[in-house]
């Protein structure tokens, strides 16, 4: 079982994401933004950071990287893809997920331990959590405010596609949304960082590990 | 040479924290009577040669796919002949 983690110019959390994959028991594979080959991975993580310096819009230029052409195609075929923070922004810019992420409403960078409620535990990345499981993981972002029009928000909620919600809204995200999924449940975008909460030595909890153990089961099952 | 200008603005219903910060600075500097400030982006695209209908259509496509995100932004496009 191989989990690929893409490195874009300006990615920050690619090494932590690879480590989290390894802690969960997967083989972590480093993928390069300029290489369209996914090197046989079974799932992909788009990590946090400031790819291309967040120029134009966060994720807007990364979305057209050669590796993304392959990831968009494979995601359409059902391959699990998790976008964390900047990766979530890339998924929205790629139209793999609806909505967009704009600057935090309070205009400050936020870095804190954040509690979330997992509201959909049927996706490829959340099956190891109980329904309405509350987890505390790291939140650190500048453009973390999830926005979409009312019809899209209603559709996401109606179809159970809100994966995680903030308990105490830290950034102005509409309807406290911290993470969403696509119709099929294989693509998940999440603003907080599960990869920073997989070991007690370096994280507030090990609550983030479930994202990585969930996808192992999803791949084995398929 | 012709120049195509694309102005991108956040949609009115989307909160603009940067514009709000600028608005706050207006007040601190004593520029009164300002109801609101919204910040956008301006792209000046210089073409090789004339801005034919086809070329402008191409730039419009670039605006749709790259320069603006239609989920949160609107844009206007006009040609400046030099």
Image (tube, coloured by chain):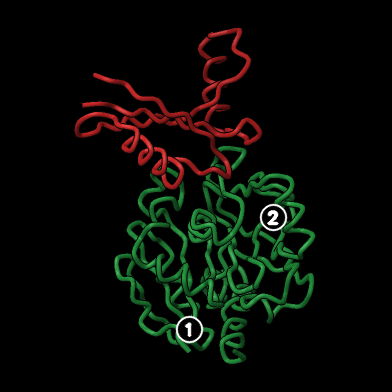
Chain colours: A green, B red
Asked whether, in this view, residue A12 is left or right of residue A143, the answer is left
Question: Residue B3 or A67: which is nearer the viewer?
Answer: B3
Residue drawn 41% across the image and 68% down it: A14
How many numbered discs, if any?
2
Q: Secondary structure at mark 2?
A: strand
Give the residue displayed 33% in from the left and 38% down from the top: B54
Locate residue B24: give its quadrant: top right
**The numbered mark 1 sits on a residue in which chain?**
A
Q: Nearer the viewer, residue A153 or A4?
A: A153
Q: Above or below — where is A130 with respect to B42? A: below
Task: Report crowding for label 2: few under 14, some 14 to 19, many 20 or more residues within 10 A (C-alpha).
Answer: many
- Look at 36% across and 76% down and name the residue there: A30
Q: From the viewer's side, name the closer residue of B1 and B72.
A: B1
**Placement of the C terminus of chain B among the 4 image quadrants:** top left
- Position of the N terminus of chain B by quadrant: top left
Give the side of residue A112 with respect to residue B8, left or right.
Answer: right
Residue depicted at x 75% and y 56%:
A155
Q: Which residue is mark 2?
A: A177
Front disc: 2 or 1: 1
Residue A209 is situated, as x and y percent measured from the top left of the image, at: 59, 78
Find numbered disc 1 in the image and state the secondary structure of the residue it sits on: loop
The x and y percentages for residue A192 are 59, 60
Q: Which mark is residue A100?
A: none
Q: Position of residue A70 (x, y in %)?
A: 41, 71
Circle 1 residue: A42
Chain that bears disc 2: A
- Whichever of callouts 2 and 1 sits on the residue coming sooner in the sequence is 1
Q: Is residue B27 above or below residue A195?
A: above
Give the spatial CA distance, label 2 vs label 1: 27 Å
Residue A41 percent across, percent down from the top left: 43, 83
Query: Image quadrant of residue A51?
Result: bottom left
């Amino acid at each position: 079982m191989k989990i690929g983690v893409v490195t874009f110019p300006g990615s920050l959390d690619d090494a932590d994401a690879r480590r989290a994959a390894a802690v969960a028991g997967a083989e972590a594979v480093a993928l390069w933004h300029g290489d369209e080959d996914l090197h046989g991975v079974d799932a992909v993580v788009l990590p946090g950071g400031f790819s291309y310096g967040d120029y134009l819009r966060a994720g807007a230029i990364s979305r057209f990287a050669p590796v993304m052409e392959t990831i968009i195609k494979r995601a359409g075929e059902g391959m699990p893809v998790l976008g964390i923070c900047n990766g979530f922004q890339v998924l929205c810019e790629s139209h793999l997920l609806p909505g967009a992420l704009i600057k935090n409403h309070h205009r400050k960078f936020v870095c804190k331990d954040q509690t979330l409620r997992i509201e959909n535990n049927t996706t490829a990345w959340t099956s190891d959590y109980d329904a309405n499981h509350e987890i505390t993981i790291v939140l650190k972002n500048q453009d973390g405010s999830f926005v979409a029009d009312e019809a899209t928000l209603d559709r996401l909620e109606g179809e159970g596609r809100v994966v995680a919600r903030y308990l105490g809204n830290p950034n102005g995200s509409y309807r406290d949304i911290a993470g969403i999924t696509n119709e099929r449940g294989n693509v998940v975008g999440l603003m907080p960082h599960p990869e920073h909460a997989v070991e007690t030595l370096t994280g507030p909890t090990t609550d983030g590990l479930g994202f990585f153990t969930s996808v192992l089961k999803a791949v084995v099952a398929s | 040479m012709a120049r195509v200008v694309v102005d991108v603005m956040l949609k009115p219903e989307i909160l603009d924290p940067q514009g709000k910060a600028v608005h706050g600075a207006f007040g601190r500097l004593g520029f009164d009577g300002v109801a609101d400030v919204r910040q956008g982006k301006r792209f000046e695209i210089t073409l090789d040669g004339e801005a034919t209908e086809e070329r402008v259509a191409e730039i419009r496509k670039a605006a749709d796919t790259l320069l603006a995100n239609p989920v949160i932004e609107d844009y206007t496009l006009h040609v400046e002949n030099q």
